């Protein structure tokens, strides 16, 4: 028996299929490249494109829209401009530029658009954040009052940094700016602080050395490195600090404390100048565009200590600026000084005199001040800056004058020992109790009868002596965070006891 299908049935099936059919229309707004070169592309036809929108070029190259002009838009490219030619089609993504964020980034080295550079495989995260956001307002913030310990005696005692502060590190090249940053990261071990190190315009060998040091000291467990080396396009160097800040904000809004280091913003400004001049934006002072101040202010204003209602997280910013021949009155240094809450000024003369870290206590300042110190540190460090200021004044006078009275000689004698106390080896951050004890010994004249060259050995062995014989003193300082009269008396006795032991051992040797 042969099955026969009536023509009416076939017609009915076709009708049903036609009714079910829904045409899929995909509407893409496209433009055409009219000029390309030097990492910049000009495009005709993207009439509805947004500023800072990501656009897609052929060969998997992306760009970010910077200039919205009457007949065209100009983009910076995040890939090789050799892969793009005139007449190529450009598509809108309808997304403002964003970067992957999340816990998976900890311990990784990435470039400013989130591509891993460390050969440890793909980063699996489905969360992204736009790299440019408006900083939290006044109501969303609270006072900076929790210390962020750097482990460096000269800084924690005289120029304290608080969680949520913006403290500039400024000085000439090769005198220890990055060393302070690395020491600070190393010192955050077991402090529940996520660290983000943004390398901008540095040699790849220098960045590799920083990464190796952080790995060697176990700091990579809580650190993320965002790398835009000198060989990268200016576009990547330009967005690098914003990307680092965005990653930090992800953790900050989760109630965590974050330390973000921008090393360095001089190169960032130079990259932005290069882009701006290629985009035909008007040049101003030193050929920088007029909005170069806004470039850094909108970045550093994102450093914040959030109110308890917003989770109480914080983002601390340590921007680095390189000066030329110590000129802190140049354009970019003065801009960043006026944006930040203080600066740590490193001086070349101090560095070559062997005073390292080469912090100049006269030109360095923290506008948060004692709010970012525990009471015990305030107690011992109060006289320190005054002693050093008097010493520096007298030392300059003593070079001109022949004889000094006994009081002046005593101040010089004390100042030499205080300078020696503040010297510190690289990658050797100290705990708070260690800093308090040695500064207490110095300001109270307990080491005035020691030779300057013996102070370093005295300090190292004093920590060992107290740790082994008087661990209760350490516990009391850490717990109370205050030096009571009784504790000061006991500390004085312990230091004098150790000094006798130290001097007798020295005589025997």
Image: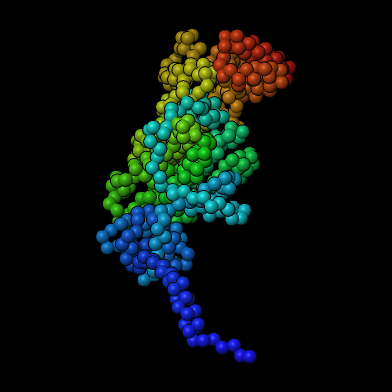
Q: Position of residue 51 (x, y in %)?
A: 35, 54
Would residue 240 appear left or right of 119 to someone viewing this image? left
**Total numbered labels placed on residues in the image:** 0
Nearer to the camera, 350 or 432? 432
Nearer to the camera, 211 or 52? 52
Q: Which residue ends up furthest to the bottom in the rendered image?
A: 1
Q: Which residue ends up furthest to the right in the rendered image?
A: 508
Nearer to the camera, 179 or 211? 211
Q: Which residue is at 39% across, 66% downward? A: 28
The N terminus: image quadrant:
bottom right
Nearer to the camera, 431 or 100? 100
Would residue 470 appear left or right of 105 to someone viewing this image? right
Q: Is residue 12 above or below residue 289?
A: below
Q: Which residue is at 65% across, 17% downward? A: 473
Q: Which residue is at 54% across, 39% downward? A: 195
Residue 496 seen: no
The C terminus: image quadrant:
top right
Q: Position of residue 32 (x, y in %)?
A: 35, 68
Residue 121 seen: yes
Q: Position of residue 496 (x, y in %)?
A: 64, 12
Q: Which residue is at 58% across, 34% downward? A: 192
Q: Which residue ends up furthest to the front in the rendered image?
A: 1
Q: Is residue 358 above or below residue 222?
A: above
Q: Position of residue 386 (x, y in %)?
A: 45, 17
């Amino acid at each position: 028996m042969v099955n026969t299908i009536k023509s009416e049935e076939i017609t009915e099936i076709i009708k049903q299929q036609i009714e079910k059919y829904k045409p899929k229309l995909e509407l893409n707004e496209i433009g055409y490249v009219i000029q390309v070169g030097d990492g910049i592309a000009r495009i005709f036809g993207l009439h509805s494109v947004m500023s800072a929108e990501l656009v897609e070029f052929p060969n998997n190259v992306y760009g970010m829209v910077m200039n919205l002009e009457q007949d065209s838009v100009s983009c910076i490219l995040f890939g090789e401009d050799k892969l793009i030619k005139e007449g190529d089609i450009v598509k809108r993504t309808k997304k403002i530029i964003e970067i992957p964020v999340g816990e998976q980034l900890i311990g990784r080295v990435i470039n400013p658009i989130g591509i891993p550079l460390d050969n440890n495989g793909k980063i699996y995260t489905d969360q992204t954040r736009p790299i440019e956001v408006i900083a939290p307002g006044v109501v969303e913030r609270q006072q900076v009052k929790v210390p962020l310990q750097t482990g460096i005696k000269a800084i924690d005692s005289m120029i304290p940094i608080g969680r949520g502060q913006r403290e500039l590190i400024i000085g000439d090249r090769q005198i220890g700016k990055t060393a302070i940053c690395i020491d600070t990261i190393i010192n955050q071990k077991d402090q529940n602080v996520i660290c983000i190190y943004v390398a901008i315009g540095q040699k790849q060998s220098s960045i590799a050395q920083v990464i190796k040091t952080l790995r060697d000291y176990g700091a990579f467990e809580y650190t993320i490195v965002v790398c835009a080396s000198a060989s990268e396009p200016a576009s990547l160097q330009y967005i690098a600090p914003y990307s680092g800040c965005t990653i930090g904000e992800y953790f900050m809004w989760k109630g965590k404390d974050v330390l973000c280091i921008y090393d360095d913003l001089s190169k960032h400004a130079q990259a932005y100048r290069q882009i701006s001049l290629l985009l035909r934006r008007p040049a101003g002072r030193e050929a920088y565009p007029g909005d170069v101040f806004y470039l850094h202010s909108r970045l550093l204003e994102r450093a914040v200590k959030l109110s308890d209602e917003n989770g109480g997280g914080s983002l601390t910013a340590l921007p680095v600026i390189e000066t030329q021949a110590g000129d802190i009155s140049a354009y970019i240094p003065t801009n960043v000084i006026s944006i930040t809450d203080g600066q740590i000024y490193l001086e070349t003369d101090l560095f070559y005199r062997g005073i390292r870290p080469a912090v100049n206590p006269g030109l360095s300042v923290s506008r948060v001040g004692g709010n970012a110190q525990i009471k015990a540190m305030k107690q011992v460090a109060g006289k320190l800056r005054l002693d050093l200021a008097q010493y520096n004044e007298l030392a300059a006078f003593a070079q001109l004058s022949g004889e000094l009275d006994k009081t002046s000689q005593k101040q010089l004698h004390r100042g030499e020992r205080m300078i020696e106390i503040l010297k510190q080896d690289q990658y050797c951050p100290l705990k708070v109790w260690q800093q308090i004890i040695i500064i207490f010994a110095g300001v109270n004249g307990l080491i005035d009868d020691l030779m300057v060259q013996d102070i370093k050995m005295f300090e190292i062995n004093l920590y060992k002596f107290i740790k082994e014989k008087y661990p209760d003193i350490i516990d009391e300082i850490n717990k109370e965070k205050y030096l009571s009269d009784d504790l000061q008396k006991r500390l004085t006795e312990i230091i004098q006891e150790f000094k006798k032991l130290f001097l007798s051992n020295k005589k025997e040797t």
